[in-house]
Amino acid sequence: MDRRLIDYKPELELGSVPAATQKTRDEYGEMSFAAQLLEAQTPGALAVVLKDLVARGGPGAALAEPIVGVLQRAARMVFPLNATRAPGDLKRKAAAIFGMELEGLSPEDKEFELARRFVRLAVDAVARARSRAGQEPGRAVQLALLQAARKHAPGLLRQRARTAPMPQAASAGMWHRQENRIEVLDC
């Protein structure tokens, strides 16, 4: 055998490999939490995953408990922890909440994409709650989730509007019709 081929070591100029950017790290974290959410089979396991997600965002201790509670209620609408409803119904409902079109995806990909969208909603809600640290914790968390839902889950707001009871002041009161106008009294 020719010894020249064995000893041949060419010098190659390779471009530098870019380091992991913040975006890829965030995406990796998002996918990791999405997988953990899908693995959660009980409300307790879901609470542990959500606590880890909230701790990653770093809100103060006063905000941690209220935001985990709010996220748990939102997660129950998306993830089938019990088998009382058909998974297809929940997936359709969750797709409507997040404003997604899931046609053409496998069932596993649909679940994973829904979980990723929920993680985005949760991370944004945590960041917004942390920016409202001076307010009362329950109110700050509610406002943060509403703002995050406007961006990531518009169907959640529509659904809440449908199920929210009408305030008593709006459904009661004195009024009378005068020709083609309605006149409201005592306002």
Image (cartoon, rainbow, N blue to C red):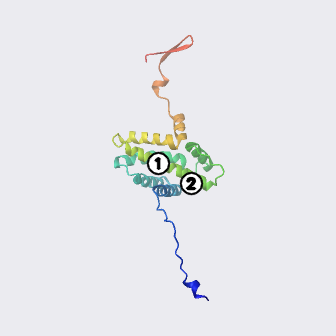
Tell which circle, 2 or 1, labels the residue nearer the N-terminal end: 2
Cα–Cα span, label 2 and label 1: 15 Å
From this view, report whether residue 177 is shown above or below residue 167. above
Q: Which residue is mark 2?
A: 112
Please state the horizontal and vertical placement of residue 87, each as a whole percent of the image: 60, 50
182 vs 57, left or right, is: right
Residue 137: image quadrant is top left
Residue 128: image quadrant is top left
Front position in the image: 126 or 13: 13
x 54%, y 84%: residue: 7
Q: Which residue is mark 1?
A: 122
From this view, report whether residue 183 is shown above or below residue 158. above
From this view, report whether residue 35 is shown above or below residue 92. below
**Labels in figure, total:** 2
Please state the horizontal and vertical placement of residue 85, each as a whole percent of the image: 59, 47
Label 2 packing within 10 angstroms: few (<14), some (14-19), many (20+): some
Proximity of marks 2 and 1: CB atoms separated by less than 8 Å: no
User: The residue under label 1 is which amino acid type?
Assistant: Ala
x 49%, y 45%: residue: 74
Q: Which mark is residue 27?
A: none
- Identify the secondary structure beneath mark 1: helix
Label 1 packing within 10 angstroms: few (<14), some (14-19), many (20+): many
Please state the horizontal and vertical placement of residue 93, each as a whole percent of the image: 59, 44
Q: Quadrant of the C terminus?
A: top left
Please state the horizontal and vertical placement of residue 184, each as a whole percent of the image: 48, 16
User: The residue under label 2 is which amino acid type?
Assistant: Phe
Asked whether residue 80 appears in the rendered view, the answer is no
